[in-house]
Amino acid sequence: MLPRIDSIKQIRLKIGITQKKLASMTGVSTSMINQIESGRSQPSYETAKKIFENLTKLEGESSSHTAGDFCSTEIVKLRPANTLHDAIKKMHQSSISQIPVFDDSDVVGMVSEDGIVKHLADLGETELKKSKLEDTMEPVPPIVDWDTPANVLVPLIRYSKCILVSKKSKIMGIITASDTLKMME
């Protein structure tokens, strides 16, 4: 499935190429690219596919940033024996919405606002606060290498609350949805 046609101009401008260059790479006229970007013309599937393939290739070349450039190295952590009350308190103190759960240096799960809200319906407020994270935590979030290209992170964060970043098999940072917004700047 291709991205939305109306994203072509935004991607092209982000990469910093002209309509003329994109047209040349795709094998269509500059006028056609202009019409597609302005919504006056709909490209065929094959043309749209070529446009997005070229934009993706150029985006990869222009993106020398890595996960290590965008991750936060100060990771707020909890342990499996902590309670959901501990998690809620720590989330409020740090203004965050998810916290990885570590057993010594090994990540064993994650707790998030969404997960807490889901458990609230099942357990009730009193029981919720006493529940141990080991009984209620969510699965381990994705872990990527420090040198993972930044353009890989955006699709990944859509399906996960956060991404952990490792360097030499040690968790060194965390990337949240708000960190991926920094990539757009």
Image: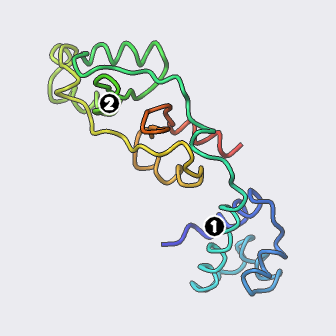
Specify whether 128 is left or right of 149. Answer: left
Specify whether 121 is left or right of 158. Answer: left
Kindly indicate the quadrant of the structure image that contains residue 51: bottom right
* Residue 31 vertical position relative to residue 184 in the rendered view, above or below: below
Q: Which mark is residue 56?
A: 1
Specify whether 58 is left or right of 128. Answer: right
Point out the residue furthest to the front here: 168
Alpha-carbon span between mark 1 and mark 2: 35 Å
Q: Observer-nearest residue: 162 or 3? A: 162
Residue at (67% x, 74% y) in the render: 54
Of callouts 1 and 2, which one flags the residue occurring earlier in the amino acid sequence? Answer: 1
Q: Which mark is residue 106?
A: 2
- Indicate the quadrant containing the C terminus: top left, top right, bottom left or bottom right: top right
Q: Position of residue 39 (x, y in %)?
A: 70, 73
Q: Helix, strand or loop at disc 2? A: strand
Q: Helix, strand or loop at disc 1? A: helix
Name the kind of residue labelled 1 in the image: Thr
Residue at (20% x, 26% y) in the render: 134
Kindly indicate the quadrant of the structure image that contains residue 92: top left
Specify whether 18 is left or right of 73. Answer: right
Q: Where is residue 44 in the image (x, y as percent from the top left)?
A: 61, 86
Q: Where is residue 65 in the image (x, y as percent from the top left)?
A: 66, 47
Kindly indicate the quadrant of the structure image that contains residue 80: top left
Q: Observer-nearest residue: 172 or 142? A: 172
How many numbered discs, if any? Answer: 2
Kindly indicate whether the residue at mark 2 contacts the one at mark 1 (C-beta within 8 angstroms). no
